[in-house]
């Protein structure tokens, strides 16, 4: 691993050098106007910290658990389709990074290698994320393989009934391998609450519902026995003009009322972002773009370095907040604040050299 990676902005720059334009656009872009993606970043920027002083912070523990699985920091690896475009080993590289660091990997059903090869690649706990790409017999077959491979949970993504207009890769004519494979779109478009119940029963594993963006759906999901409510808008890559995940997090947490654990993704770039989400009620956050950047910059070692840098930022911020354990965080440590930087997919790295100058967008 190159020693010059002192911050994740250097990881991003290395990833940009290593990726061709189509893969880069697939990773960093959102849908249509990319408003939802920018609002995700804005959702974090609108909260500021309220530190407590004169607290003994000589020992800070950033670890936590998610459904009983220990996490070194409250960060898991989000499911990403076509991970093999960022590192040849694809999901296996992420599995090894999760094991080396002490995280959890959520494995997309639309990435390579096979779910069995990814499961065998590292000892970290793994959750399988399912896209319904065929009939119920196909679902039963896939989930039988998932259970046999030792996955500790099952995740259904619910915000992808239709594939969105992701215009950055569209304009260059680039298609991810997962899109090239071709699936009958009617199956994803036909998933209902009743189908979710059948999938959860067939799976027989702790159940994550990803793509929850409204308190009403969160409350309904808990009534259907969902174990983890995953607050997500697909990183701004599905419905455009949506609201930030951080904006809806407090009302979703209130609707869940402790009956399930809550995960959030969308716009996470810094350790401070992680702590803001935890303070507002999330159990953990998931990283997508940062995961892809780490893999593109240096494969498994690059992703481990991303997680190490997040840990450094988390521990530093916890100590300066006057908090020694993740469980000690709460809404008393944050308050609404004015933004200082226009939000975009890399706006938390103001020193990044780009064609537009420091703080500009890296295209």
Image: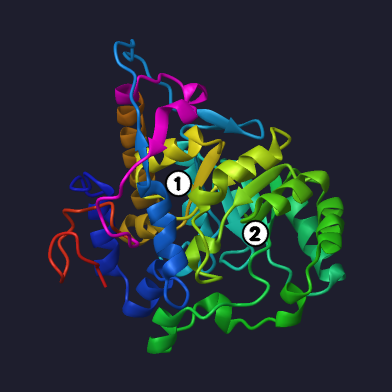
The residue carrying mark 1 is: 97
Look at the numbered disc 2 and give the secondary structure of its residue: helix
Q: Toward which corner of the image does residue 274 lie, by quadrant?
A: top left
Residue sitting at x 70%, y 49%: 218
Residue sitting at x 53%, y 39%: 284
The reply to whether the magenta stretch includes residue 43 is: no
Which quadrant, please, contains the C terminus?
Answer: bottom left
Where is residue 36 drawn, in percent x and y? 47, 65
Residue sitting at x 76%, y 76%: 187
* Furthest residue toward left: 357
Residue sitting at x 22%, y 53%: 10
Q: Toward which corner of the image does residue 157 lie, by quadrant?
A: bottom right
Q: What's the image's color scheme?
A: rainbow
The reply to whether the magenta stretch includes residue 327 is: yes
Q: Is residue 305 above or below residue 267?
A: above
Where is residue 300 drawn, in percent x and y? 40, 51
Stretch of the chain drawn in magenta: 319-345
Where is residue 209 drawn, in percent x and y? 69, 53
The residue carrying mark 2 is: 115
Look at the numbered disc 1 and give the secondary structure of its residue: helix
Question: Viewer-proximal residue, 342 or 151?
Answer: 342
Where is residue 143 drawn, in percent x and y? 78, 58
């Amino acid at each position: 691993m190159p020693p010059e990676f002192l911050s994740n902005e250097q990881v991003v720059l290395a990833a940009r050098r290593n990726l061709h334009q189509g893969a880069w656009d697939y990773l960093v872009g959102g849908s249509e106007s990319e408003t939802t993606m920018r609002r995700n970043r804005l959702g974090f920027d609108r909260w500021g910290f309220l530190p407590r002083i004169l607290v003994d912070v000589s020992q800070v523990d950033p670890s936590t658990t998610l459904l009983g699985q220990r996490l070194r920091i409250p960060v898991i690896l989000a499911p990403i389709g076509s991970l093999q475009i960022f590192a040849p080993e694809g999901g296996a590289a992420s599995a090894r990074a999760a094991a080396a660091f002490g995280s959890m990997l959520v494995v997309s059903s639309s990435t390579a290698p096979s779910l069995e090869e990814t499961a065998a690649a590292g000892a970290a706990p793994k959750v399988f994320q399912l896209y319904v790409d065929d009939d119920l017999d196909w679902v039963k077959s896939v989930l039988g393989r998932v259970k046999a491979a030792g996955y500790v949970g099952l995740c259904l993504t619910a915000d992808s009934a239709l594939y969105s207009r992701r215009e950055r890769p569209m304009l260059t004519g680039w298609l991810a391998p997962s899109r090239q494979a071709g699936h009958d779109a009617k199956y994803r478009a036909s998933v209902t609450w009743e189908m979710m119940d059948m999938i959860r029963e067939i799976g027989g594993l702790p159940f994550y519902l990803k793509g929850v963006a409204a308190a009403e759906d969160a409350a309904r999901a808990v009534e259907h026995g969902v174990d983890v409510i995953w607050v997500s808008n697909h990183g701004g890559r599905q419905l455009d003009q949506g609201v930030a995940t951080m904006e809806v997090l407090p009302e979703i947490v209130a609707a869940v009322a402790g009956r399930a654990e809550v995960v959030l993704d969308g716009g996470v770039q810094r350790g401070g972002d992680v702590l803001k989400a935890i303070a507002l009620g999330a159990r953990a956050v998931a990283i997508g773009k940062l995961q892809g950047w780490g893999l593109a910059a240096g494969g498994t070692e690059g992703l481990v370095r991303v997680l190490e840098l997040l840990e450094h930022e988390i521990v530093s911020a916890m100590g300066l907040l006057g908090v020694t354990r993740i469980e000690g965080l709460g809404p008393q440590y944050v308050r609404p604040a004015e933004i200082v930087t226009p939000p975009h997919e890399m706006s938390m790295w103001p020193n990044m050299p780009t064609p537009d100058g420091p703080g500009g967008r890296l295209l």
